Image: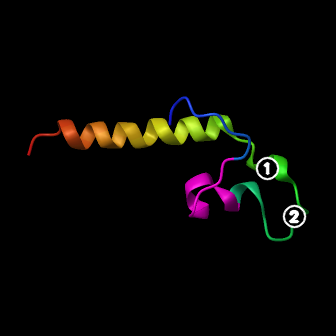
Amino acid sequence: MKNGQFDIWLSSHASQFSLHEKHKPTDPYRPEAFFDKAGYHKSLATLKKRYDDKIHSPR
């Protein structure tokens, strides 16, 4: 997923790609609001850190 190529980043849950911050219900249609590769990579890094922390934590 880290090297995936895309134009628009969407997911099944709006919170996973910060839809409510990028597009308000009263905003006009702007597809470029979803062109967020930096946000995608930041989310992947956050999820990987959470995963690594769980895997490497003492039980």
- Residue 16 among magenta residues: yes
Q: CA distance from mark 2 to mark 1?
A: 11 Å
Quarter residue 51 falls in: top left
Question: What is the x, y in percent for residue 46?
Answer: 44, 40
Q: Residues within 10 Å of mark 2 (few under 14, many from 20)?
A: few
On screen, residue 13 above or below 30 = below
Q: Secondary structure at mark 1?
A: helix
The residue lying at 66 percent from left, 48 percent from top is: 9
Nearer to the camera, 21 or 41: 41
Nearer to the camera, 7 or 56: 7
Q: Which residue is mark 1?
A: 33
Looking at the rendered structure, which numbered label has been put on residue 46?
none
| Sequence order check, earlier mark of 2 and 1 | 2
Give the magenta range.
9-20
- Residue lying furthest top: 3
- Residue 39 among magenta residues: no
* Horizontal side, residue 37 vs residue 30: left or right: left
Question: What is the x, y in percent for residue 50?
Answer: 34, 43
On screen, residue 27 above or below 56 = below
Q: Are marks 2 and 1 in contact (CB under 8 Å)?
A: yes
Question: What is the x, y in percent for residue 36?
Answer: 70, 41
* Horizontal side, residue 52 vs residue 57: left or right: right
| Three-letter code for the amino acid on which mark 2 is drawn | Asp
Q: Secondary structure at mark 2?
A: loop
The residue lying at 19 percent from left, 35 percent from top is: 56
Q: Which residue is mark 2?
A: 27
The residue lying at 74 percent from left, 49 percent from top is: 34
Quarter residue 52 falls in: top left
* Horizontal side, residue 29 vs residue 44: left or right: right
The residue lying at 86 percent from left, 70 percent from top is: 26
| Three-letter code for the amino acid on which mark 1 is drawn | Ala
Question: What is the x, y in percent for residue 17?
Answer: 61, 53
